Image (tube, rainbow, N blue to C red):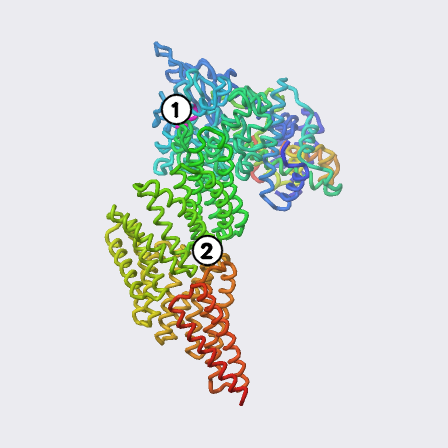
Amino acid sequence: MTSDRWNRIEDLCHEALERSENQRAAFLESACAGDESLFREVQSLLAHQERADKFIETPAFDQAAQALASQEESLRPGVSSRLVGRMVSHYRIIERLGHGGMGEVYRAVRADDQYQKLVALKLVRAGFDSQFILERFKNERQILAGLEHPNIARLIDGGTTEDGLPYFVMELVEGEPIDRYCESHRLSTVQRLELFRSVCSAVHYAHQHLVVHRDIKPSNILVTAEGVPKLLDFGIAKITDPEHFPRPVEPTATAMRVMTPEYASPEQIRGEAITTTSDVYSLGVLLYCILTGHLPYRLTTRAPHEIARAICEIDPEKPSTAVNRVEDVPGPSGTTVRLTPELASSTREGQPEKLRRRLRGDLDQIVLKAIGKEQSRRYTSVEQLSEDIGRYLDGRTVLARRATLSYRTAKFVRRHKAGVTGTVFVALMLIAGVVAIVRESQLERAQRARAERRFNDVRKLASSLFDIHDQIADLPGTVAARKTIVSTSLNYLDSLAAESSGDPSLQEELAVAYEKIGDIQGRPGTENLGDTSGALASFRKGEQIELALVKNNPRESGYKFTLAGLYLRLGHQLGSMGNYAKAIEEDRKGLDTWTELVRSDPSSTRLQNNLAISHLNLAQHEEFLGDFQASIDNFGKAAEIYGRTRESSITKNAHNAIYNLGVTYIWLSQTLRDQGDYAKALECSEKSLEIRKTVLGWNPKNVRAQLDLADTYTQLAEALWRKGDPARAVTEARQAQAIAEAAAAADPNDQRAKQDMADSYYPMGEAFRLQGNFAKALDFGQRIIKIDTGLSALDPVNTDVKGQLGQAYGLLGDVYQARAAQLSAGRRQRASDLKEALASYQKASEIYQNLRQAGALPYSQISELERIEREILHCDAVLSKLKRE
Amino acid sequence: MSSESPQDVTQLLRAWSGGDPQALEKLTPLVYQELHRRARHYLARESPGHTIQTTALINEVYLRLVDFRGVTWQDRAHFLAVCARMMRRILTDFARSRHFQKRGGSAQQVTFDEQMVVSSAPSADLVALDDALNGLAGVDPRKSQVVELRFFGGLSVQETAEVLKVSEETVKRDWRLAKLWLLREMSGERPSHDI
């Protein structure tokens, strides 16, 4: 239609409207002058004039509000409905009880029933009979038909009305919503928990029948006069088995639910997949509310969007803290109640302080675990939640309590994986957990069960350390966090050790805790914190405690086991500090104790393993002292034990045996190499390489396994350059270099990675020297010096690093000397290289001398010191000769 | 009201008119909240037939939602237009989600119209109206805008004239004709083939 024509229609309309009604027709006829279509057009518009007066004069907003009001009005319980008095199948409708998401519920009676049994009859709500709603309604009926549980309203009957609308008949539940019931009956916290567990059993039952309720809130749980809670309204429940109900949730339904989201889980709010743990969440919020009277979040309004944001973003307050809030909460029949700590406790435990005490600790943790933002942090099932409450009621240790620390650890690990470097912050969080335990122990001290409680505290601490250690030790970037943990934990242990006496089980726990801390501080060959002397001190403390225990309880093999483990660590530790004689003493004590233990229980692969480790330590230390025969002998015994357990034991022990066999071959190859048997050394390194590749395959992200492999490549390269194959030595050393550098880059605090980096540079430098590539050889030598100097400053008593530093200076001296000896070198070049060589040799000599004085120079390096002394004399002589010329 | 201050709402409105669809999502709950507040108001008063005068009401809503102090005089007009469009979107969606006044097939059902005693005016089906309004925009965009501003935006004749930069007389004429057109459209009895 052209705008001209539209303008014409418009004008005619206005002109006609200015005339009285009975004049309009005549006016239009003349005005249209035979244009029939124009006449009809204007006429059809004017036909609506009467209705137009009031049409859309009220703004849409007001109109919507009015409609909303009348809708709510019509849905108030008891409001008369045209259905009241009518028959639906055999049921006479008595009155309206309320409405669910899409249905209306009526009180009804079965008319042909002589007992006049009252029932609840649910019909599709007026005006809500879209295909979608009808589907949902049928869905609910189908779900209810499959559920028979004392705490779920039972389905009695169902059918279709004369108008073709579905209905169903349920057991009539007359009662109060669970939150009101708890208040009006002034239930104690324990009673509330018991009532809540009945609800859990209903939800768990539904879950077992593949039904997720998805709308758990107080108004859907009515408690009868007999105190039996009944779960109602499966209106938006979902059958989790997609084969039965493949239809996705319609977005409108989700949007409508967001209108009252207090009990919705974060994933529900975000519209993500909803599982049984979503019900765990809603139950957690319900528990929170019935225990405290508050929602988990402090809110300024109860606007849906604000609640939604809180649910997704704000960490909930502990229930024991929430009861301190003064907050306006919805009360009975639409009123608002100002909830104060006094009011909340008056219907629960009496006094606010009593309520706070009741909630603090276990209940706080249980509730918080149930309402974790991430599904993986919650109880995995409703049953688990219910059982934990049961544990609390029985006075046993609750799951949620332990989960706090592992949760923190897990969170830490996640954060780490995301590459966020917040290590110090996270360390403080971890410490907060440990400190909380400490403080608790101080509070409990005054109490009757003090010994037992402290025992538990120590055990908790020790096991938390195990947890943390095991979870983070193999990850890069965790060193700073672990350092802080250790220093705090040590203070705590020392104070406990000073006070504890005469309680063997507590002492045993203490000794184990010291052992664990020592491991974290500086157990060689693990991702330790590089505090060798600290570790030794911790092991000694543990040893002292354990020695007394064994002396007083000679028949307890458990104490011997711990003691033997400490000997093993002490030997290892002393060895890494260069004190081989002392190390061998500890090794022999350990070997004796393990042998005794194995004799009493020969079938234990664990004991066998430990015996083998003792042999290994001893072998290594003997080797350092130059007792090669004894050393090779002990290596052989260890390999024999591992070979046996590898064949005979179950997976985990077989893994251990394989792992240890890898270590044994490496050490053996070193011994053989030092004796000049490079071919055999190479053979052993290759065996180790194969084993360590297998080990890494079990867990490719394990940094320790990665570095072990790097070390093996280094050992291969060491044998190769000495054997006279510098090209292959460089190839193998490059592999080691790549692994170690990546690990060191991932965690700048990882001393082991740095060590392995430096270790890989050494054969590389030697190989380049042999190839005449002096620049590269010098470069690698200097890199080693830089790294080892740093490591040595961090851990001054570590003689291994010092020995390696001496070796690197030796390498530099050799390279400079070789360069000076080149035919092409000029006189000046020759003099300057010789000076450098001399200075390097002197450095090396100084380091070795110091080690020898400390008794920490391995036998194999004594000859190296002698060689260097000769080189010094040689360089000196050549230099003087050059000067004279 | 909510933690969202009027300034925030003003920002959100600007963002939305600048093409950010998420801003509307944030505004929607605020409008719903006002809607429920207003509905409770009606329920509490329980005086059927009473309607407070209309533009006063919607102005109150805007004042609660929007900080007009942050709006300069020359873009106030534009701003009111944005408000009206927001209201249209939100209220229509609301009606859609609530199945407002949507009659089912069965005769024995209680429909909302029957219970609309609070207002003597026949209530419009917001969803049908929204559709019809889209049709009108194709025929006469200014008339469609007049309806949007007055009905959804709750603006007075004077404010509508100001926004559209036309005379008040034009607004009145547009309003009158638009209502006829919409009623005919919604009645489904449109005889003409070529509109």
Compared across the picture, whether A211 is left or right of A875 comes to left
Magenta part of the protein: which range? A195-200
SS under mark 1: loop
Position of the C terminus of chain B, as image quadrant, is top right
The percent coordinates of residue A229 (x first, y second) are 42, 22
Q: Nearer the viewer, residue A116 or A405?
A: A405
Compared across the picture, whether A141 is left or right of A264 comes to left
Q: CA distance from mark 2 to mark 1?
A: 63 Å
Q: Is residue A196 magenta?
A: yes
Is A471 located above or below residue A261 in the figure? below
Given the image, what chain letter belongs to the residue carrying mark 2?
A
Mark 2 burial class by Cα count in 10 Å: few <14, some 14-19, many 20+: many
The percent coordinates of residue A823 (x first, y second) are 47, 87
Asked if both marks, 2 and 1, belong to the same chain, the answer given is yes
Q: Residue furthest toward the top?
A: A114
The residue type indicated by label 2 comes to Thr
Compared across the picture, whether B153 is left or right of A113 comes to right
